[in-house]
Image (cartoon, rainbow, N blue to C red):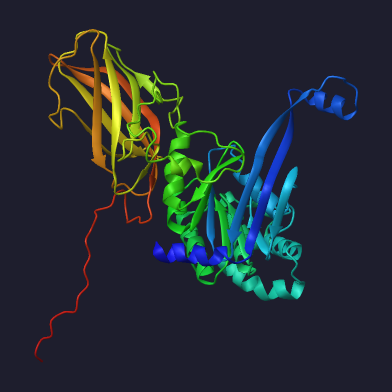
Amino acid sequence: MKDRETKIQVQEVDIPAIEIKDVVKVYKLYDRARDRVKESLGLGRKQSHKLHYALNGVSMNIYRGETVGIIGTNGSGKSTILKIITGVLNPTAGEVHVAGRISALLELGAGFNMEYNGIENVYLNGTMMGFTDREIEAKLPEILEFADIGDYVNQPVKTYSSGMFVRLAFAVAINIEPEILIVDEALSVGDVFFQAKCYHKFEEFKKMGKTIVFVSHDLSIISKYCDRVFLLNKGNLLGEGSPKEMIDAYKRVLVGQYEVPGAGAHGSLADSMETDNKDGTDGQATGTDGVRNAGVNPDAQEYGTKQAEIVDYYVTDERGVRAMAILKGTRFTLHMRVRFHDHVPAPIFALSIKNVLGIEITGTNTMIEKAYLESGEPGQVKDITFTQKMTLQGGEYLLSLGVTGYNGDSFEVYHRLYDVMDVTVVSDKDTVGYYDMESEVTVADAPRTEA
């Protein structure tokens, strides 16, 4: 971490690779298509549009050799700022200065002609980046080897799968020796082996002193590769800082626990992280009784007799702050509130965790843990917590909750909620499989033996 901080301090006295000053991007939104036509022709006296600020006075400096991440919820302005940097969009106000050749991998298909085959699109993209045909020809074998799509390179790209498409697009972007590489979430469609190859290339770029800017919802990647992170929300820059600071701040954004800063404010969110809402009891419930529903699945399946009902649920991190992202290796708590509408003998409260493929990874309940063996009575409300260490690999997981029990010899389901919450595990070290065994590894010289 010290090396990384020193690196950033040295770069800050240098000329920024990308300088963004008070950038504003405004769109006019119309309720009906005909309103747009009428207004453009000047036929109506009444203004029929609303203004939407995709970016609202955003300023950033990105220095040479940095790997910078931009995070935020959907609609926060992440892709918009990248398009303005690359010249795909013009800002409504503000300035952007770029020092160096940019290679950008934005939306899938950007810069490709669907009727051209793969090789023709390589030449097309290279030409748009300012390369001559001879220079592109010299790079072609390296590009095709990296893309590794075989004979499909001679077929029209409209026939490509999304995986083949991103392979070719990234191979072009990464192999034309840019000074600045910009990537917008595109790698999420590649297979895991191709993603590993791409991130290995990121490491090579970092060692070569190149500048990398990328947008990703994968907080594990942000944590592992970025020197600095910018956090956007609803067109405003909420803060900038280390990956850990901004990921913690982002977790607060997800549950609405932040103050909207002035346009372009820096660090205001991270500065208040340690003192604001430590106990997570600021009315930000994420369950069925709650106001904030970040990370909650609106289409979660539920069933049961409702003699006992799960009325609230949320997750807190090791500091007790409500969170939808948990750092691997830290402790976290699942909170569940249950209201009893009837007499329930010996209720069992349960938690299970699945991956996005629906495979149940782990789970437990109060009967297994021998934690609660009493009955529930009408009108009672119980708060149940499951606290454990997060050893799952980085990624997205789904939580399911339940209240069941035995009524005599009969097994009863009082209330079950399947895949009700999404939790992100943030990791900078993923081992093989579903969870980390937390191995302690030593390598030592073997004792010499006499010949």
Residue 271 sits in quarter: top left
In the rendered view, would you say 359 is above or below 102?
Answer: above
State the image coordinates of residue 255 (x, y, percent, origin top left): 44, 32
Residue 224 sits in quarter: bottom left
In the rendered view, would you say 282 is above or below 154?
Answer: above
Q: Nearer the viewer, residue 91 or 366?
A: 91
Q: Residue at x 29, y 49 (%)?
A: 329
Question: Is there any visible trace of residue 109 in the rendered image?
Answer: no
State the image coordinates of residue 96 (x, y, percent, origin top left): 70, 53
Residue 55 sits in quarter: top right
Q: Residue at x 50, y 63 (%)?
A: 8
Quadrant in which the C terminus appears? bottom left
Q: Nearer the viewer, residue 288 or 321?
A: 321
Residue that lies at the very extreme toward the bottom in this rendered image? 451
In the rendered view, would you say 49 is above or below 328?
Answer: above
In the rendered view, would you say 128 is above or below 53?
Answer: below
Q: Residue at x 15, y 32 (%)?
A: 369
Residue that lies at the very extreme toward the left in this rendered image? 450
Quadrant in which the N terminus appears? bottom left
Q: Nearer the viewer, residue 331 or 295?
A: 331
State the image coordinates of residue 267 (x, y, percent, origin top left): 50, 45
Left/right of residue 212 with respect to residue 118 in the rendered view: left
Left/right of residue 208 with respect to residue 114 in the rendered view: left
